[in-house]
Image (cartoon, helix red, strand yellow):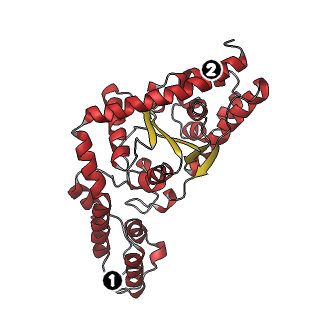
């Protein structure tokens, strides 16, 4: 089964990104044909600095490989290296209803906040549809906030198939399960938009310092506390085995502890959990030629698949014989 997803190179990944999405990408590559791309074309809607975009794109590749994406199992590539996708975007755009795009939440949310929404943001769902359809993707793992875009993709593909005959595979969304369970440093859902994230990579001491500053309530140490509703406990359980999690839960229920003790345990557990990935990333940084070869090979395979799909679409609608 062909599985596809992309990540935008708009900043370094945080714990929420990993447990909400990336970890599942890694799991899915074991039994499925995974296509994972770095969405630099999408990032142009927010990044206006060429040097930053290039560095972010490289960082995204290093991060994915360090976290366990295996180029022998999955295809990793940069979106803009597959020009067939932009060609397919235009083909889809010519029959995309304006009203459909006006209802998409990313555009509506930005307009509601009084922010300038450019044509790139408005037509973002069409490019996303082309990303998916170009590789005959069957399953697209996404967060709940992206499910609407998969529905748009299915609408566009279904309309094209109705007009010109069966051309595109209709994908289904696989809703990711873990993202809502990753609280940030303020207790809200971890998000770059809230400036409450904890990074996967970077200076370990700085990350530990951020963990120690996590906001907690002011209940006395001796009070019993419900682990299920505590965001520090929710973070701890991400990195710990069942036995340690239960031990921590018992400590919460009995009371008589300080949140500082829990923060130290969260820091220790997270450092151990990501230690291998951090070491692997350092090795990859020393061998960027190897990383570039992986991306080159990924783009080559992606182009081969996309070229076949675009050829089908062009023949179906009359752009080729």
- Looking at the rendered structure, the secondary structure element under dot 1 is loop
Say which residue label 1 marks: 221
Q: Nearer the viewer, mark 1 or mark 2?
A: 2
Mark 1 or mark 2: which comes first in sequence?
A: 1
Which residue carries the number 2 mark? Answer: 311
Quadrant position of the N terminus in the picture: top right
Left/right of residue 199 with respect to residue 79 in the rendered view: left
Mark 2: give few (<14), some (14-19) or many (20+) Cα within 10 Å. some
Instruction: Identify the residue shown where x is 32% and y is 31%.
Output: 292
Q: Position of residue 266 (x, y in %)?
A: 32, 68
Residue 121 image offset from top left, x and y in percent: 54, 31
Circle 2: element type = helix
Q: Residue furthest right?
A: 162
Q: Are marks 1 and 2 in contact (CB under 8 Å)?
A: no
Rendered residue at 46%/42% (across/down)? 74
**Residue 73 or residue 64, whichever sits in front:** 73
Horizontal arrangement in the rendering, residue 284 relative to residue 227 (left or right): left
Q: Is residue 18 in sight in this rendering? A: yes
Q: Quadrant of residue 257?
A: bottom left
Which quadrant holds the C terminus?
top right
Give the x, y percent position of residue 67. Answer: 36, 50
């Amino acid at each position: 089964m062909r599985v596809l997803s992309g990540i935008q190179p708009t900043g370094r990944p945080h714990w929420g990104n990993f447990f909400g999405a990336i970890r599942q990408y890694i799991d899915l590559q074991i039994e499925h044909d995974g296509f994972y791309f770095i969405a630099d074309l999408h990032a142009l809607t927010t990044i206006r600095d060429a040097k930053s975009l290039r560095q972010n794109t490289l960082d995204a590749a290093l991060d994915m490989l360090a976290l366990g994406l295996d180029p022998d199992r999955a295809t990793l590539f940069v979106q803009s290296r597959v020009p067939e996708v932009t060609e397919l975007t235009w083909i889809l755009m010519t029959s995309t209803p304006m009203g459909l795009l006006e209802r998409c939440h990313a555009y509506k949310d930005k307009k509601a906040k009084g922010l300038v929404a450019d044509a790139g943001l408005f037509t973002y769902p069409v490019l996303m549809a082309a990303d998916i359809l170009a590789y005959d993707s069957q399953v697209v793992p996404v967060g709940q906030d992206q499910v609407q875009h998969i529905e748009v993709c299915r609408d566009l593909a279904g309309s094209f198939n109705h007009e010109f005959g069966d051309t595109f595979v209709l994908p289904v969304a696989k809703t990711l399960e873990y993202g809502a369970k990753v609280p940030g440093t303020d207790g809200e859902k971890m998000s770059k938009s809230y400036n409450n994230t904890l990074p996967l990579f970077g200076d370990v001491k700085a990350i530990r310092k951020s963990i120690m500053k996590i906001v907690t309530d002011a209940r006395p140490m001796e009070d019993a506390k419900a682990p299920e509703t505590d965001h520090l406990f929710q973070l701890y359980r991400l990195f710990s085995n069942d036995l340690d999690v239960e031990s921590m839960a018992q400590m919460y229920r009995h009371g008589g502890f300080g949140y500082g003790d829990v923060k130290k345990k969260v820091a220790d557990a997270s450092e151990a959990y990501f230690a291998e990935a951090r070491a692997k990333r350092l090795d990859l940084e020393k061998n960027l030629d190897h990383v570039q070869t992986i991306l080159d090979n990924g783009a080559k395979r992606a182009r081969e698949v996309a070229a076949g799909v675009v050829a089908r679409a062009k023949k179906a609608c009359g752009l080729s014989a």
